[in-house]
Amino acid sequence: MSASPSIAIAGGGIIGVSTAWRLAQRGFRVAVFDQGNMGGEASWAGAGMLALGGEIDEPSELARLAVESRRLYPAFIRELVETSGLAIDFQELGAIDLAYSAAELAALESRAAGQATMGIDSKPVLPAQVASFWPRVRTEGLLGARFYPGDGLVNPREVVVALCAVCRKLGVRFLQNCAVESVSDGGADVQITSADGVATFRAAVVAAGAWSGAIVVNPVPVPASFPVKGHLLGYQQPSQTCNTIIRHGHTYLMQRTNGFLIAGASVEHAGFDRHIDSQIAAQLAMAAGFVMPHLLETTPTETWVGFRPASEKLRLGRWQSSNVYLAYGHYRNGILLAPVTAERLAEEISADLGIG
Ligand code: GLY
């Protein structure tokens, strides 16, 4: 009997590791390479919003997949929790979008009308209802709001820890501090060059987030990727301070079950600059404090940055009829898109290689 095909995954974030899980479940032998620790970059930095309402404005391939992935999320988390035995903070609590001017209200309403055609439901909320159900939210000047019952959140750090645990049970190999430098497609297989040396696999998946485009892929280079930096703030707060996700313009607030309240996020084209900019952090704190005035009296306990994995568009699937598959360019929605990305890729690779 011949051994099952081996797959190398370049990138151990939530996308790479969830793909590893689904491939291993189908019988593939999988190795995941990461330049640092598994889940140590965007999956560590991301707030973990599963927020079609906040993130999806117009129809696109990414939008369609995001809607499908949101539907998959409860079962994805249930299966992960059951098979890993680990807890994951997953809250299906909805989100409210706030409008403090006529222009903001008109924009909310027109966006909601477009979203409804994509199956993203929302309903109007009156300022008096906001005052009753979101008592910490600023109501001075509030003209209206919309509630998105389908939005939720998850702790992506816990998801990656659980994914690594279930992968290990299925024999997935993790190579940390071991960046993939190049992938050479030889027709029948691929050669991976990494800090671990050169190794041969049946196929490779490029899932290295913002670093994906830097991997040298032969003979056909893969499309470029780039980082979009975001600053986030964390506050330790009493539970139920944020009883749903709360959004105003580009600012969002959300709270983990343990009380940690996250305010995000800046959008910066600054390359891989890990510097925390106190001015940007202060602007974010002001924006968070505008929505929840009591936060103006509170100092954030943490400030951090992350690199959203951007590309010109979502890169998902087989690359140019080769043995190389792409899974990057998820930009603001990598956490949300992990379940559907993993399922789609595992299906496609199984079909191409004739197993599963
Ligand atoms: N998905 C939220 C963000 O990228 O800031």
Image (cartoon, rainbow, N blue to C red):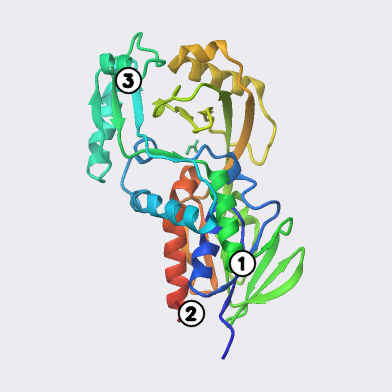
Q: CA distance from mark 2 to mark 3?
A: 53 Å
Residue of label 3: 133
Seen at 69% across and 51% down, the residue is: 37
Q: Quadrant of the N terminus?
A: bottom right
Q: Quadrant of residue 299?
A: top right
Q: 200 left or right of 144?
A: right
Contact (CB < 8 A) between labels 2 and 1? no
The kind of residue tagged 2 is: Leu
Of mark 3 and mark 1, the one earlier in the sequence is: 3
Q: Quadrant of the C terminus?
A: bottom left
Q: Position of residue 86 (x, y in %)?
A: 55, 50
Seen at 37% across and 15% down, the residue is: 135
Q: Position of residue 245 (x, y in %)?
A: 41, 30
- How would you rate the neighbour count of disc 3 (Cα within 10 Å): few for under 14, some for 14-19, many for 20 or more? few
Q: Nearer the viewer, residue 221 or 151?
A: 151
Q: Is residue 315 visible?
A: yes
Q: Nearer the viewer, residue 198 or 235?
A: 235
Q: Quadrant of residue 46?
A: top right
Q: 149 left or right of 284?
A: left
Residue of label 2: 353
Q: Which mark is residue 172?
A: 1
Query: Is disc 2 placed on a helix, strand or loop?
Result: helix
- How would you rate the neighbour count of disc 1 (Cα within 10 Å): few for under 14, some for 14-19, many for 20 or more? many
Q: CA distance from mark 2 to mark 1?
A: 19 Å
Seen at 61% across and 56% down, the residue is: 12
Q: Position of residue 113 (x, y in %)?
A: 22, 35
Of mark 2 and mark 3, the one earlier in the sequence is: 3
Query: Is disc 3 placed on a helix, strand or loop?
Result: helix
